[in-house]
Amino acid sequence: MNRKTLDHNHFMREAIRLARKGIGKTSPNPIVGAVIVRNGKIMGRGYHKKFGDWHAEINAIKDTNGNVKGATLYITLEPCCHYGKTPPCVETLIKERIGRVVVGTLDPNPRVNGKGIKTLRSKGIKVDVRILEDECRELNEHYFKFIKSGIPYVTVKYAQTLDGRIATKTGNSQWISSEALRTYTHRLRAVNDCIMVGVGTVIADDPQLTVRYAKGRNPLRIIVDSKLRIPLRSSVLKDNNSHLTTIATTSKAPARKVTAVKNLGAEVLVVKKDKNGGVSLRDLLRELGKRGITSVMVEGGSDIVTSLLKANLVDKMIILTAPKIMGKGLEAIGDLGVCKIKDAIKFSTFKTMRRGDDFVFVGTILKNT
């Protein structure tokens, strides 16, 4: 690895560090970080702080003394070349006479996707591409999936015992994981656009599905409830965030119950039925995508997790495992129709870590082709 590559990696890592400051704040836009360098020293830093705000490269320019002519910009994602909430960033880079742009990864948005780089080069600006590309792509796994498919990135998260149980045979599940993992879970909630659970989880546990043990915004709450069985006294309907609650149901929902739920401030979203008469999860995800929701974290229960996995709709799994043995109880995942080991769900990448007494598995599912 030559000196130039080492320098590129050093400054791109700083841009990646800055980009992470925007996690959970920019959706449906990507998270992006940028630094401006002259003579081997950083003269400006910036990141995309929130949706609708200035983009990373503009904030980096604002952070300098105002003269960036001939300097090098390191940016985690290709600069935009179209009008949105803000003007095209490539126009500013050209106007400010930036000398070189080093890009982490291309933007898959069809309105960009190489066009920003092409425009910069056409104006005589040198461009280097795909520096620490894997790390830069990982920053925006939610955005990349959403922009390519129109469907949110789906993460399944649940806590289980060593023998794969998420509740006792009587339905008791609080608390399988440790308090340290509750903090971790709330951080995950804060960086996803919405949290999804089945109505069975609401009936059994009455969860709040808010961010309380970490900093961050409360996500939208989606309750999958084909017959609208949700108790009207549920926390997701009675707290101050009922406007963040959507009940995804079907035409089987009683009209009187629909009215009662709406009167509590929640939304009732009627979705097509699947072949079993339940909510079509694929159609629900499509509808969420139309609303600009780029990421969904599913927190249970077993039925909805199993259905999503069978339909090949899950992108990532986060499994919190407590060092406990429960024996007979509710299994984390039901029948997936797997009869041969070779047909088991596999992971393209995964990592494990320890939080308190518990273990965390984070894996990206290897998609069927």
Image (tube, rainbow, N blue to C red):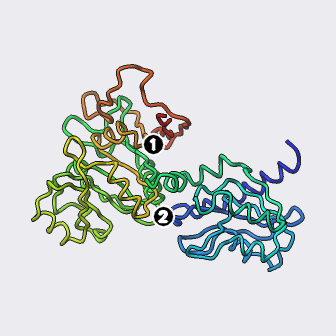
Above or below, 92 relative to 135 = below
Label 2, secondary structure: give it: loop
The residue positioned 22% from the left and 53% from the top of the image is 225
The residue furthest bottom is: 66
User: Residues at badges 1 and 2 in contact (C-beta under 8 Å)?
Assistant: no
Q: Amino acid at mark 1?
A: Ile
User: In screen coordinates, is 5 left or right of 226?
Assistant: right
Quarter holding the N terminus is: top right
The residue furthest top is: 340
Tell me the crowding category of disc 1: few under 14, some 14 to 19, or many 20 or more residues within 10 angstroms, Cα based.
many
Q: Which residue is mark 1?
A: 318
User: In screen coordinates, is 232 left or right of 16?
Assistant: left
Label 1, secondary structure: give it: strand
Return the x and y of residue 170 as percentages of the image width and height: 18, 38
The residue positioned 18% from the left and 72% from the top of the image is 263
Q: Which residue is mark 2?
A: 215
Q: Amino acid at mark 2?
A: Lys
The answer to which of 272 and 209 lies nearer the viewer is 272
Mark 1 or mark 2: whose residue is earlier in sequence: 2
Asked which quadrant contains residue 94, the reply is: bottom right
Q: Nearer the viewer, mark 1 or mark 2?
A: 1
The residue positioned 83% from the left and 49% from the top of the image is 6
Return the x and y of residue 355 as percentages of the image width and height: 49, 43
The residue positioned 83% from the left and 61% from the top of the image is 126
Above or below, 121 relative to 322 = below
Return the x and y of residue 296 as percentages of the image width and height: 41, 54
Looking at the rendered structure, the number of numbered marks drawn on it comes to 2
Q: Which mark is residue 147?
A: none
Tell me the crowding category of disc 2: few under 14, some 14 to 19, or many 20 or more residues within 10 angstroms, Cα based.
few
Mark 1 → mark 2, Cα distance in angstroms: 20 Å
Above or below, 225 relative to 366 = below
Return the x and y of residue 33 as percentages of the image width and height: 67, 63
